[in-house]
């Protein structure tokens, strides 16, 4: 009986490895520009761009990305997640702040990867904050995303110390790679392990 139970537990855990979604899933994804229609340049005066999103379950964040090109190639940004304050980022409620990353010259999805940050249900803002670099030919996030599905509901920009928010935004391209937590199959495996432990306890 013990061997059979062990086989069931191993099978459940293997199923978790095979069936759990990888970081190809996106908690939030506007899509990349179909037809680029401008960009927002992050500089020492235009310091933040952000997009609002909502999640209804706990997720593990794997990446925070924007569709950027670096022009001069020497701008550093931080990827951020903030709470919500009446349709603006709540900078007093920082859920996550990355180390600075360099925006490369080729136009592509860029940001921070390999994260393991838990994000609870709620209304949040993701975005990017300027750290260092030139004030001309700086890092630019491209607009013209299709908005999938019809998001973000709000975009915000901080320029010369003031916030500006836009309902439906300018369709700049943002996305967050993530997996939902916890996968039910891992709960099954944990439950089976618990049952095995109880069985041993009572057998003693």
Image: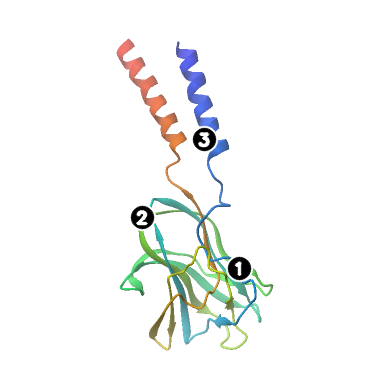
Q: CA distance from mark 2 to mark 3?
A: 23 Å
Instruction: Count the marks.
Output: 3
Q: Is the N terminus in the top left, top right, bottom left or bottom right quadrant?
A: top left
Q: Residue at x 59, y 79 (%)?
A: 139
Please give the name of the residue rendered at 49% of the width and 21% of the height, measured from the top-left corner: 8
Q: CA distance from mark 3 to mark 1?
A: 31 Å
* Residue 121 tag number: 2
Q: Position of residue 12 (x, y in %)?
A: 50, 28
* Residue 137 against residue 129 in the figure, above or below: below
Residue occupying the point 49% across, 14% down: 4
Residue 69 - label: none
Q: Is residue 30 visible?
A: yes
The answer to whether the residue labelled 1 contacts the one labelled 2, judged by CB atoms less than 8 Å apart, is: no
Sequence-first disc among 3 and 1: 3
Q: For the residue labelled by badge 3, is the local secondary structure a helix, a strand or a loop?
A: helix
- Mark number displayed over residue 16: 3
First of labels 2, 3 by sequence position: 3
Secondary element type, mark 1: loop
Q: CA distance from mark 1 to mark 2?
A: 25 Å
Q: Is residue 58 above or below residue 176?
A: above
Q: Estimate the x, y position of residue 101 in percent, counting from the top left.
A: 56, 69
Residue topped by disc 1: 32
């Amino acid at each position: 009986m013990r061997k059979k139970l062990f086989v069931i537990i191993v099978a459940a855990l293997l199923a978790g490895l095979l069936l759990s979604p990888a970081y190809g899933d996106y908690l939030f994804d506007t899509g990349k520009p179909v037809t680029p229609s401008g960009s927002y340049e992050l500089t020492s005066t235009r310091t933040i761009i952000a997009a609002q999103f909502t999640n209804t379950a706990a997720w593990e964040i794997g990446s925070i990305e924007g569709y950027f090109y670096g022009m001069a190639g020497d701008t550093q940004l931080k990827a951020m997640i903030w709470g919500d304050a009446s349709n603006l980022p709540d900078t007093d409620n920082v859920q996550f702040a990355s180390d600075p990353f360099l925006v490369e010259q080729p136009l592509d999805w860029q940001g921070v990867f390999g994260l393991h940050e838990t994000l609870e249900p709620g209304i949040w803002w993701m975005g990017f904050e300027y750290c260092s670099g030139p004030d001309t030919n700086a890092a630019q996030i491209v607009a013209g995303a299709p908005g999938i599905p019809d998001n973000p509901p709000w975009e915000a920009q901080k320029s010369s110390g003031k916030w500006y928010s836009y309902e439906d935004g300018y369709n700049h391209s943002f996305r967050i790679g993530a997996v939902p937590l916890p996968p039910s199959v891992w709960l099954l495996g944990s439950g089976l392990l618990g049952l095995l432990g109880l069985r041993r306890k009572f057998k003693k």
